[in-house]
Image (spheres, rainbow, N blue to C red):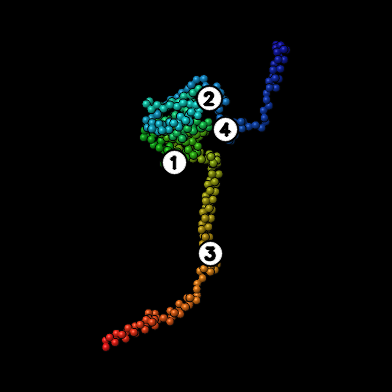
C-alpha cells in the first residue's frame, strides 16, 4: 500500500508537469517548421563571435601534379591574399610539389581551415583560381568525386567519362545550368563547386553515368521536375503537347498572314517640297542675255566681221597691183 504522502507528491508532480507543458498551436504544419524562408541567409561568422581566437594551430597539406606547377606559381600571390583576409597562412613548395595551409593566432573562424583545405585541393585538380576561391564563401561547398575505380576497363572508362562531358561540353553545360554548380572533369576525378542541393544532384548524375546510365535521362527528369511535368498523368501530358503544337501552328499562320498583308499596304507618299524663292544674289540678268542672243543672230556662224572683210579686200587689191 502506498502512503498518502507519496500519492499527494505524485499528484502534485503530475499537475506541475501539466502546467509546464506549452500549448501547441492548433493549425501549425510540421513542414513549415522544416522549410527555410526564401532569401534567408545565415549571418556571417565575425570576430565578435569568437574574440579569444583558437587554442591550437591546425594545418593541411596536399600534393599537386607537375603540370600545375606553372599555373600555381603565377596565381599563388592571389591565393595568399585571399587567405590572409581570414588570417590563414599558405605556403607553396615547388621542390616537394605540395601546398600547405595553417591557422595563425589571429584566426577566429574555426571552420575556415577546412575551406582553405578545400581550396588547395581544388587548385590541385585543375580548377581555376577564380572558381576555387568561391569555396571561402559561407553558402558555397565543394565535392571531389573519385571515378577512377568505378570502371575497371580503361577504354570503357574513357567512353563513359566523355559521355558525361558530351559533344563540345554540351552535356556538362546543361548539368551546370540545372544544378547551379561549376563542374570540372579532370583525370580520375570530377570537381564540383556550388550549393549543397546542387552538389547532391551532380554526384548522383556522375555515379549513374559511370554505371552506364546516360546523363541525359537525369537531366530530362530534372527539367520535368522543375516545370512540374513529371507529376502529370499521361492524358494531361498528351493534352499539354497538343496545346503546344496548336500554339505553334497558330503562330506560323499569323506570320504567313502578316507577310501576305504586306503586299496590300500602300507605299508611303513623299512629302511635297515647296520650291524656294530665288535670292537676290543669284538672280539672272535677262537684259544682257537678250543682247548676246541678238548679236549671235546677226552674226552668221563662221562669217567674218565687217572690219575683217575690209582689211581682206585691201590686201587682195595690193596683191593685184604688185602682179601688174
Label whose residue precedes the other's in the sequence (2 or 3): 2
The tag earlier along the polypeptide, 3 or 4, is 4
> Which mark is first along the chain, 4 or 2?
4
Instruction: Give the Cα distance between marks 1 and 2.
Output: 43 Å
Point out residue 212 in the picture as x, y percentages from the top left corner.
42, 35
Please report whichever mark, 3 or 1, sits nearer to the chain's N-terminal start: 1
Q: Which mark is residue 270?
A: 3
Which residue is found at the position 43% from the left and 33% from the top?
A: 75
Which element type, helix, strand or loop, lies under badge 2?
loop
Which residue position is annotated with label 2?
Answer: 108
Q: Nearer the viewer, residue 233 or 271?
A: 271
Q: Are marks 3 and 4 in contact (CB under 8 Å)?
A: no
Kindly check if marks 1 and 4 are in contact, taking CB atoms under 8 A apart as contact: no
Q: Nearer the viewer, mark 3 or mark 1?
A: 3
- Badge 2: residue crowd in 10 Å (few <14, some 14–19, many ≥20): many
User: Which one is in front in this view, the residue at disc 2 or the one at disc 4?
Assistant: 2
Q: CA distance from mark 1 to mark 4?
A: 32 Å
Residue beneath disc 1 = 170
Q: Is residue 172 visible?
A: yes
Is 324 displayed left or right of 205 in the figure?
Answer: left
Badge 3 local density, few (<14 within 10 Å), some, or many (20+)?
few
Quick check: 82 above or below 280?
Answer: above
Image x and y of residue 299, in percent: 41, 81
The image shows residue 2 at horizontal and vertical percentages of 70, 12
Q: Position of residue 175 (x, y in %)?
A: 47, 38
Residue 41, labelled with which disc?
Answer: 4
Marks 2 and 4, how far apart in space?
Answer: 21 Å
Amino acid at each position: 500500500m502506498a502512503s498518502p504522502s507519496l500519492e499527494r507528491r505524485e499528484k502534485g508532480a503530475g499537475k506541475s508537469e501539466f502546467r509546464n507543458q506549452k500549448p501547441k498551436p492548433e493549425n501549425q504544419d510540421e513542414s513549415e517548421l522544416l522549410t527555410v524562408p526564401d532569401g534567408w541567409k545565415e549571418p556571417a561568422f565575425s570576430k565578435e563571435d569568437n574574440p579569444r581566437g583558437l587554442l591550437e594551430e591546425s594545418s593541411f597539406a596536399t600534393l599537386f601534379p607537375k603540370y600545375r606547377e606553372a599555373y600555381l606559381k603565377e596565381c599563388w600571390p592571389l591565393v595568399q591574399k585571399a587567405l590572409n583576409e581570414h588570417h590563414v597562412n599558405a605556403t607553396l613548395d615547388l621542390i616537394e610539389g605540395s601546398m600547405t595551409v595553417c591557422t595563425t593566432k589571429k584566426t577566429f573562424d574555426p571552420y575556415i581551415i577546412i575551406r582553405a583545405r578545400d581550396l588547395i585541393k581544388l587548385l590541385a585538380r585543375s580548377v581555376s583560381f577564380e572558381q576555387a576561391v568561391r569555396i571561402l564563401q559561407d553558402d558555397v561547398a565543394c565535392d571531389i568525386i573519385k571515378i577512377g575505380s568505378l570502371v575497371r576497363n580503361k577504354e570503357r572508362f574513357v567512353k563513359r567519362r566523355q559521355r558525361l562531358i558530351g559533344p563540345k561540353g554540351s552535356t556538362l553545360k546543361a548539368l551546370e545550368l540545372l544544378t547551379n554548380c561549376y563542374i570540372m572533369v579532370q583525370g580520375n576525378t570530377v570537381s564540383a563547386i556550388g550549393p549543397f542541393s546542387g552538389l547532391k544532384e551532380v554526384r548522383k548524375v556522375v555515379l549513374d553515368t559511370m554505371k552506364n546510365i546516360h546523363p541525359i535521362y537525369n537531366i530530362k527528369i530534372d527539367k520535368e521536375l522543375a516545370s512540374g511535368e513529371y507529376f502529370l498523368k499521361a492524358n494531361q501530358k498528351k493534352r499539354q503537347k497538343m496545346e503546344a503544337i496548336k500554339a505553334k501552328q497558330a503562330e506560323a499562320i499569323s506570320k504567313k498572314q502578316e507577310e501576305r498583308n504586306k503586299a496590300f499596304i500602300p507605299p508611303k507618299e513623299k512629302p511635297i517640297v515647296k520650291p524656294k524663292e530665288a535670292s537676290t544674289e543669284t538672280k539672272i540678268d535677262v537684259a544682257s542675255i537678250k543682247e548676246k542672243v541678238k548679236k549671235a543672230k546677226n552674226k552668221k556662224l563662221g562669217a567674218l566681221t565687217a572690219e575683217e572683210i575690209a582689211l581682206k579686200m585691201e590686201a587682195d587689191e595690193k596683191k593685184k597691183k604688185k602682179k601688174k
